[in-house]
């Protein structure tokens, strides 16, 4: 089986290290990876950025800028040529699903379809009770500021998040594009700090709907190691119960380090692959 990292970043994320892409690729080779997908955060829509009223750093440090887009694409293309005999490198983006900005996202996906090898579709921004489309994972203080009132009823917040994930899958289907759904349980990123409860029966029904939609659309799940690095989370995205159900449904899971610095590469790979093997054996 090929050893693959399907979710990685570069210095153009603007919220990671300034290490060169070649540093990541060299480390991936040392770790024995055969396949490596570069999935930088795609530029956010201009209309969204114009309306952004949250921390200024989150506005400018969440993704590639449109001016950097051709620079990033050439960087990945050059790496493919330079490492052709050592590592299979694939061209990708992590694209934000933004409620209310579907038209811009659809246009971007269609424009980039011929360049892309793989795409991750993620929900990082969610409407709060005040109607602000706010960052879920910028930092805990921002989360508390914008979603504090939602924490009175966490299940309603969870369900609003999974409603957005389900809508992202529908958008991918409309674009006729197979995608990988990114870090499915990101909504739990601060679960320890805010003492978030387990998913309720109603929320689990909604998660099942999401998984069924992923299955029906022929999509994949990002099996993301970043949650282990988050002190207020401490587990993979998605959680093991969801991993087990996804495998039962036959949904492909792709390991993603979600590396924003070279040292992130390969973290928890063996543990996570062993979980997949355990559940595959269970359902064979």
Image (spheres, helix red, strand yellow):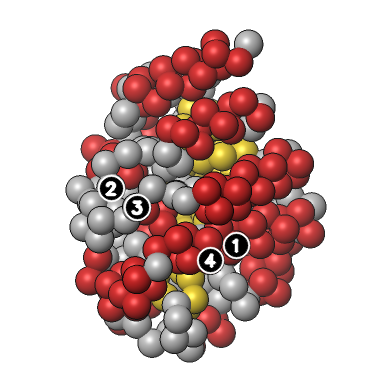
Q: Which residue is mark 4?
A: 160
| Chain-order first, disc 2 or disc 4 | 4
| Chain-order first, disc 3 or disc 2 | 3
Q: Are marks 4 and 1 in contact (CB under 8 Å)?
A: yes
Question: Which class describes the residues within 10 Å of circle 2: few (<14), some (14-19), or many (20+)?
Answer: some
* Foreground of the two, 118 or 54: 54
- In-image side of 20 versus 4 (left or right): left
User: Do we see residue 220 in this rendering?
Assistant: yes
Q: Which residue is mark 3?
A: 197
| Chain-order first, disc 4 or disc 3 | 4
* Foreground of the two, 166 or 54: 166
Per the model, the C-alpha gap separating discs 1 and 2 is 22 Å
- Of the 4 image quadrants, the one containing the N terminus is top right
x 76%, y 41%: residue? 216
Per the model, the C-alpha gap separating discs 4 and 3 is 16 Å
Q: Which residue is mark 1?
A: 163
Per the model, the C-alpha gap separating discs 1 and 3 is 19 Å
Q: Which residue is mark 2?
A: 233
Location of residue 58 in the rendering, given as x and y in whole percent from the top left corner: 34, 73
**207, above or below 106, in the image:** above
**Rendered image quadrant of residue 70:** bottom right
Location of residue 36 in the rendering, given as x and y in whole percent from the top left corner: 48, 34
* Foreground of the two, 159 or 94: 159
x 40%, y 68%: residue? 153
For residue 246, which numbered disc appears in the image? Answer: none
Select label 4 or label 3 by which is in front. 3
């Amino acid at each position: 089986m090929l050893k693959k990292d399907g979710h990685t970043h570069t210095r153009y994320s603007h919220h990671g290290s300034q290490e060169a892409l070649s540093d990541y690729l060299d480390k991936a080779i040392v770790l024995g990876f055969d396949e490596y997908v570069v999935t930088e955060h795609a530029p956010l829509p201009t209309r969204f950025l114009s309306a952004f009223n949250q921390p200024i750093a989150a506005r400018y440090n969440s993704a590639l800028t449109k001016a950097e887009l051709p620079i990033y694409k050439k960087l990945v293309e050059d790496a493919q040529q330079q490492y052709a005999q050592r590592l299979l490198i694939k061209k990708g983006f992590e694209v934000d699903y933004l409620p209310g900005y579907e038209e811009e996202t659809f246009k971007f996906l269609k424009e980039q379809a011929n360049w892309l090898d793989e795409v991750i579709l993620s929900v990082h921004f969610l409407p709060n009770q005040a109607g602000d489309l706010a960052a879920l994972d910028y930092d805990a203080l921002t989360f508390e500021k914008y979603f504090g009132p939602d924490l009175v009823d966490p299940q309603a917040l969870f369900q609003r998040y999974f409603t957005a994930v389900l809508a992202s899958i529908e958008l991918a289907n409309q674009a006729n594009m197979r995608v990988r759904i990114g870090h499915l349980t990101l909504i739990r990123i601060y679960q320890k700090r805010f003492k978030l409860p387990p998913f309720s029966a109603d929320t689990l029904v909604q998660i099942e709907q999401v998984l069924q939609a992923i299955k029906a659309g022929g999509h994949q799940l990002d099996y993301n190691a970043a949650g282990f690095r988050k002190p207020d989370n401490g587990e993979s995205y998605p959680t093991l119960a969801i991993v087990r159900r996804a495998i039962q449904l036959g949904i492909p899971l792709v390991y993603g380090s979600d590396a924003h610095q070279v040292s992130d590469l390969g973290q928890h790979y063996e543990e996570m692959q062993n979980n997949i093997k355990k559940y595959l054996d269970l359902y064979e």
